[in-house]
């Protein structure tokens, strides 16, 4: 009987530390600040954390080309 091994990696948190955010994006931590436009959220007490949803939106924009403004998208939809 054949067997299969499933390797799942679950991200249990929405907010990530810098090293976790970089790893989530597949980048070294030192490179995150230079290539990622997503700003961290400052929590009370000074902690800076990156929102997974913001990182996901940025990564999706890379797949579809340059991130467009809402006006640019609407301009392409309106043929007049």
Image (tube, rainbow, N blue to C red):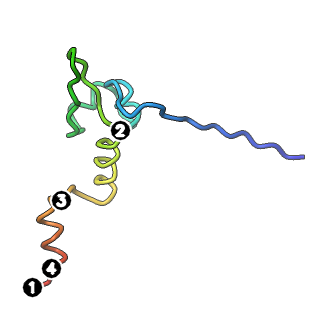
Q: Residues within 10 Å of mark 1 (few under 14, many from 20)?
A: few
Mark 2 vs mark 4: which is more N-terminal?
2
Residue 78 lies, in percent from the top left, at: 15, 79
Mark 3 vs mark 2: which is more N-terminal?
2
Residue 16 lies, in percent from the top left, at: 35, 28
- Residue to which mark 1 is pinned: 80
Is the Cβ of the residue at disc 3 closer than 8 Å to that at disc 2?
no
Q: How far apart are the two marked residues, 2 and 4, measured between alpha carbons?
A: 32 Å
Q: How far apart are the two marked residues, 1 and 3, measured between alpha carbons?
A: 19 Å
Q: How many marks?
A: 4
Q: Secondary structure at mark 4?
A: loop
Q: Residue furthest front?
A: 44
Q: Secondary structure at mark 2?
A: helix
Residue 20 lies, in percent from the top left, at: 39, 27
Q: Residue at x 31, y 41 (%)?
A: 55
Q: How far apart are the two marked residues, 1 and 2, measured between alpha carbons?
A: 37 Å
Is the Cβ of the residue at disc 2 closer than 8 Å to that at disc 4?
no
Q: Residue at x 60, y 38 (%)?
A: 8
Query: Dividing the picture into quarters, in which one does residue 73 lie?
Result: bottom left
- Residue to which mark 4 is pinned: 78
- Residue to which mark 2 is pinned: 52
Q: Residues within 10 Å of mark 3 (few under 14, many from 20)?
A: few
Q: In front here: 1 or 47?
A: 47
Label at residue 68: 3
Mark closer to the observer (3, 2): 2
Mark closer to the observer (3, 4): 4
Q: Residues within 10 Å of mark 2 (few under 14, many from 20)?
A: some
Q: How far apart are the two marked residues, 3 and 2, measured between alpha carbons?
A: 20 Å
Q: Residue furthest top?
A: 45
Query: Dividing the picture into quarters, in which one does residue 51 lie?
Result: top left
Q: How far apart are the two marked residues, 4 and 1, measured between alpha carbons?
A: 6 Å
């Amino acid at each position: 009987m054949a067997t299969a091994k499933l390797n799942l990696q679950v991200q249990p948190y929405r907010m990530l530390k810098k090293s976790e955010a970089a790893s989530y994006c597949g980048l070294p931590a030192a490179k995150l600040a230079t290539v990622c436009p997503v700003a961290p959220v400052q929590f009370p007490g000074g902690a800076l954390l990156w929102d997974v949803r913001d990182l996901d939106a940025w990564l999706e924009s890379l797949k579809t080309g340059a991130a467009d403004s809402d006006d640019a998208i609407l301009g392409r939809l309106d043929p007049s």
